[in-house]
Image (tube, grey):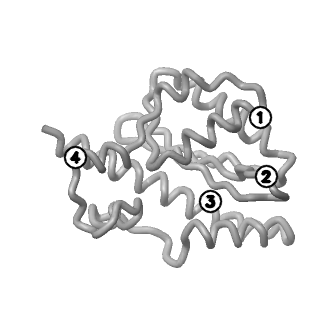
Amino acid sequence: IDFEGADIEGTKREYLIGIIERTGAKQSFHAFVANTVKEEGKMFKDALAFLKKHENAPIFHYAPYEKTALKTLGERYRQDVKEVIQRMTDLLQVCRRCVAPETSTFQLKDFGKSLGGTWHEGMNGGQSLVLYEEYQKTKDKKVLQQIIDYNEDDVKATILVKDWLVKNSA
């Protein structure tokens, strides 16, 4: 799972939640998008319903942002997220305890690239924010797709790190 958020009108808001659902060798990406600030609640509730529908599935993320965003959204929209949070594993914390990455940092995509991952070039979290602001003004679907692609790359990198950790565990 990976969240994209921004400070909008003085409040931290989430505008995209990306989830890869994986069953065996088959995986599919699901993007839950808030096209406007007013759609944040619907986006969150839809993503939460999706996660609850897969109640036995572990949830992997990279860094504490996702868990914090989930808790904040749960409070904001009066949704119980305890069960979902209990299934979440922060792979960055796992890596920091037991891995010496081939890169000089634990940046997700740098680490993923060292494991053979490839991404859409030229995007980062800051660029995603700029593009979301542009999308808010223009409603250009191509701009939104760039943000979704960036988020999908983050989720794919998370899975790559997770699979590597499992494969190389003692």
Residue 84, image x and y in percent?
A: 55, 27
Looking at the image, is mark 4 or mark 1 earlier in the sequence?
A: 1
In the figure, residue 6 lies in which quadrant?
Answer: bottom right
Determine which of the numbered discs, if any, sits on residue 148 in the image. 3
Residue drawn 46% across the image and 27% down it: 87
Measure the C-alpha gap from mark 4 to mark 3.
31 Å
- Please indicate whether residue 19 sits to the left or right of residue 156 in the image: right
> Looking at the image, do the residues carrying marks 4 and 3 touch, with CB atoms under 8 Å apart?
no
Mark 4 vs mark 1, CA separation in Å: 35 Å
Q: Earlier in the sequence, mark 4 or mark 3?
A: 4
Q: CA distance from mark 2 to mark 1?
A: 11 Å
Q: Is residue 73 above or below residue 113?
A: above
Q: CA distance from mark 1 to mark 3?
A: 24 Å
Instruction: Please name whichever residue, 75 or 146, is drawn nearer the observer in this view of the structure.
Output: 75
Q: In whole angstroms, how far apart are the C-alphas of marks 4 and 2?
A: 36 Å
Amino acid found under the numbered disc labelled 2: Thr
State the mark number for residue 98.
Answer: 4
Q: Residues within 10 Å of mark 4 (few under 14, many from 20)?
A: few
Question: Residue 20, image x and y in percent?
Answer: 50, 44
Q: Give the image location of residue 95, x and y in percent.
A: 29, 49
Point 62% across, 26% down: residue: 81
Packing grade of label 3 (10 A; few <14, some 14-19, many >=20) is many
Callout 3 amino acid:
Ile
Q: Which residue is mark 1?
A: 76
Q: Nearer the viewer, mark 1 or mark 3?
A: 1
User: Which tag, 2 or 1, sits closer to the chain's start?
Assistant: 2
Labels 3, 2: front one: 2
Specify which label sits upstream in the sequence, 3 or 2. 2
* Amino acid tagged 1: Arg
Going 45% across and 27% down the picture, which residue do you hit? 57
Question: In the image, which is nearer the foreground, mark 4 or mark 3?
Answer: 4
